[in-house]
Image (spheres, rainbow, N blue to C red):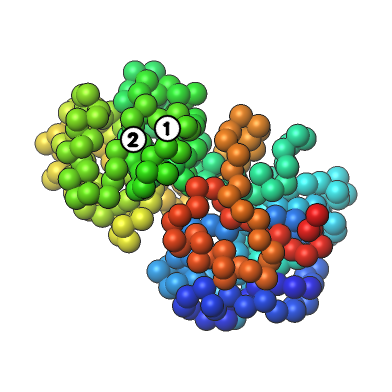
Amino acid sequence: MQAIVMTGIGGPEVLVPRETPEPRPGPGEVLIRAEAIPVLYPETQLRSGAFPMTSPPPVVFGFQAAGEVIAVGEGVGTEYLGRRVVADTAGAGSYAESVCVRAESTTPIPAGVSTTDAAAVMMSGSVALALLETAALTGTETVLIEAGATGVGSYLVQLAREFGAARVIATAGSPDKARRAKELGADEVVDHRPEQWAGDLNSSADGAIDIVFDSFGGTSATTLLDTMTPGSGRMLSYGWLSGEPARVSAAELIPRGLTLTGCSGPAWHGRVGRARTAILERVPRLAPPVEAILPLDRAAEAHERVESRVPLGKIILRPDHAQP
């Protein structure tokens, strides 16, 4: 079968199309005929060496794939056969025509939802749902959503009012992304490119920020503390777009009466996993999630596009057998 092998740590060029043996499902596993493979921003970080690989290269790359279950291993019920699913490959193996995963790592795709849309929404959407559930909105809060036009931020913007946000302020890094965030439902959009963007935020917020969904990390998280509601403001930190976690200490939080929740680790990932079914059920109510569909053998190009941070939607890889 055709697959994309990560041959080493480096740029997109380390993702190389190769013929590899088709996997066979072992006990507790299912074999999926992949039809749509999302290219995820965390994958670019793994490929570049920003995060460690669980398996050293060379290895078939990729976190997730969507398609039809075509075979099951020992101990897996035949009801899985023919089921359309999105599968989590636990860090490797999804950039391929066929993907083998644990049966419990699959999420059924509801009728009326395309396999491509399900693949595009799954990761970012389930993280957004878990964040909103953790935030425990009451219907009165002003929320700040960093990078609100793309990825997790775009789903936070779309779903925030469903979960009780009274006012939604987003940040964006270009005019196109600012327009996109407004289309998705943001009341105000702040350009986060200037160093003084937190000051601009103070003017736009027309009052204190109750909840910050922090995807940047770094020093901007510290800057935002003075924009937050004293005594009750809370920051949910889930991303490192700056290249480092939020640089916020207890000494900075305690005098202001603020809280910071770190959204990471096994317990957090379990919560995200439990949100997968719910986010796929919401796909028909969400904005079209796909930016472009490329053949599987153009994985390197797909990574280049994702790293440019220009796309507003998801880049999807499609194996040759799934081409229309």
- Secondary structure under badge 1? helix
Q: Residue at x 67, y 76 (%)?
A: 17
Q: Is residue 319 above or below residue 260?
A: below
Precedes in sequence: disc 1 or disc 2: 1
For residue 101, say whether it is visible.
Answer: no
- Secondary structure under badge 2? strand
On the image, which quarter does residue 35 sit in? bottom right
Residue 22: numbered disc? none
Mark 1: amino acid: Lys
For residue 168, say whether it is visible.
Answer: yes
Mark 2: amino acid: Val
Q: Nearer the viewer, residue 261 or 169?
A: 169
Local packing at callout 1 (Cα closer than 10 Å; few below 14, some 14-19, many 20+) is some
Image location (x, y in percent) of residue 317: 66, 60
**In the drawing, does residue 85 fall left or right of residue 169?**
right
Please identify the quadrant where the N terminus is shown.
Answer: bottom right
**In the drawing, does residue 245 fall left or right of residue 113?**
left
Please identify the quadrant where the C terminus is shown.
Answer: bottom right
Q: Disc 1 designates what residue?
A: 182
Q: Residue at x 43, y 22 (%)?
A: 164
Image location (x, y in percent) of residue 83: 81, 46
Q: Residue at x 53, y 65 (%)?
A: 303
Marks 1 and 2 close (CB-CB < 8 Å): yes
Q: Is residue 142 above or below residue 49?
A: above
Q: What is the distance, in whole Å, between disc 1 and disc 2 at their CAs?
A: 7 Å
Image location (x, y in percent) of residue 283: 63, 35
Q: Disc 2 designates what residue?
A: 189
Local packing at callout 2 (Cα closer than 10 Å; few below 14, some 14-19, many 20+) is many
